[in-house]
Image (tube, grey):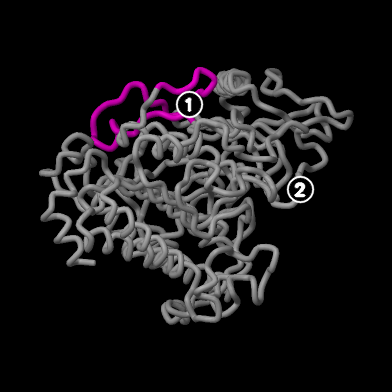
Amino acid sequence: MLSLGLVLAGTGLWAQDRPNIVLFLVDDMGLMDTSVPFLTDSHGVPVRYPLNDWYRTPNMERLASQGVRFSQFYAQGVSSPSRASLMTGQDAARHRVTNWIRSEENNRDEFGPYDWNWEGLRGSETLLPRLLLEAGYRTIHVGKGHFAPFGHPGENPLNLGFEVNVAGSSIGEPGSYLGENGYGLIRGTHSRAVPGLDKYHGSDTFLTEALTREAMAQIDTAVAEGKPFFLYMSHYAVHNPFEIDKRFIAHYQDTAYSREARGYATLIEGMDKSLGDLMDHLEAVGVAENTLVVFLGDNGSDAPLGEAQDIGSSAPLRGKKGSEFEGGTRVPCIIAWARPDYGNAWQRKYPVLQGVITRKVGTIMDIFPTLTLISGAQVPLPPAHTEDGYLLWGILSGSDDPWHEDTFLNHFPHEHRGSYFTTWRHGDWKLIYHYHPEDPAHPQCSLFNLKKDPSESRNLIRKRPRIARRLLREMIDRLQRDNATYPVDLNGHPLLPREDAVR
């Protein structure tokens, strides 16, 4: 591979007209599931917490030293909504994939909205991979899809603008991580067997490793063709089952943590090895300086540490995946050039600070406009397609960007670890609205100042009602703008948020 890179560099093939993009997405990885400290003190200085000393992610540390990491980056609370937001640049209230998609059927619950988008992406939408494909990219999907149920167009990433699909289907979790189990086809959960990796069946190749090898092979094909590539590296890790990756378990023996927690830690370290291997491969084939890497979690942590709404898996943040608290939606995000080189034309045009942590709020919707700009895929979007994200380039380069709002809407009109709620963050303030469909006359609001109380332990709704009412009005306006769908009452009538919920 090194020889190939040197030959191609000598032929001038890497005077590319467009940069490569690697979107490295980790399933169920929260902000604290790493040795990289993302949280800061009041002066913006990173602060280490015990979980940062439990996990081992040296390649995330390497990537963070080369770029910008966000202490306050948000995704939707569960998988399918976040993936739809990545593809569309829209929040969940707008695209209406507001819950995780069950592959077999509509998983609407008792009070859930009848008109939520349980069929997921259909392929007719304006989607990131299709825009990149039309702009001349080789668009590569490797790993988890979870865009639509079985039998629907979005089940197959090839219908969404990807030119290549490796191991992506409707399933949201692997039947097994073990090659000897056929990744669920031989042993494990057969209905969730990972497709398309038969050549590894019966081997000791862990799923994370198999996907990494396949991704590197696809990079080689793009390099050989002289085409810019968009690699959507979407790991099944670190979703359950928390099977042990034996390559790393020796690092987690002397501990009081449970077997499941140790298995989760090996999944984290295996994912991190994948990141390092891909970065090394980009160097070896001579394209690292032309490749932007976006590292991202798709929702809050599901680490088997503590309960869903307490301070445990994301400590010092409260809650985990699927909850209304910060641990449910705050995720790691690092953006960096794979090899910083200020002599590179693309890096001069789109500079990214090195070794910087920002407290600016970013969201998963911001990835769509940011990547369409750098790729040159900014064709006029159809009038019916509204973007909810903002460009991140001002934050990444360290310049002021007055257009980028520090806001985030999380709309979850379903039953889960947190049920029938909408959260609205604006600046330091966060409002949580519970619809209580079993008692719709008494919705409930909570108010937190995240700057002073990141653990969401002090509800200020009685002390700061004017701020709560302002945020509630903003939240209602945003939901109306998005044409959101809502929980229903016992009679099946939609429950719109009430302005009198704060008195």
Residue 336 is one of the magenta-drawn residues? no
> Is residue 466 in sight in this rendering?
no
Could you tell me residue 121's position as x and y percent? 60, 39
Query: Distance of mark 2 from mark 1, alpha carbons?
Result: 29 Å
The answer to whether marks 2 and 1 mark residues whose Cβ atoms lie closer than 8 Å is no
Stretch of the chain drawn in magenta: 380-407
Q: Secondary structure under badge 1? A: loop
Question: At 43% from the left edge and 54% from the top edge, which residue is drawn?
Answer: 233
Left or right of 117 on screen, residue 296: left
Q: Give me the residue at 70% from left, 40% from top.
A: 118
Q: Residue at x 70, y 35 (%)?
A: 413
Q: Is residue 450 above or below residue 170?
A: above
Instruction: Depth check: give the residue in front, 33 or 482.
Output: 482
- In depth, the one of 82 and 182 nearer the eye is 182
**Figure quadrant of the N terminus:** bottom left
Residue located beneath label 1 in the image: 387
Q: Image height check: is 389 above or below 182? A: above
From the image, state whether disc 2 or disc 1 is nearer to you. 2
The three-letter amino acid code for the residue at tag 1 is Glu
User: Residue 431: x percent and y percent?
Assistant: 58, 31
Marker disc for residue 105: 2
Amino acid type assigned to the residue bearing label 2 in the image: Glu
- Vertical placement of residue 78 versus 492, above or below: below
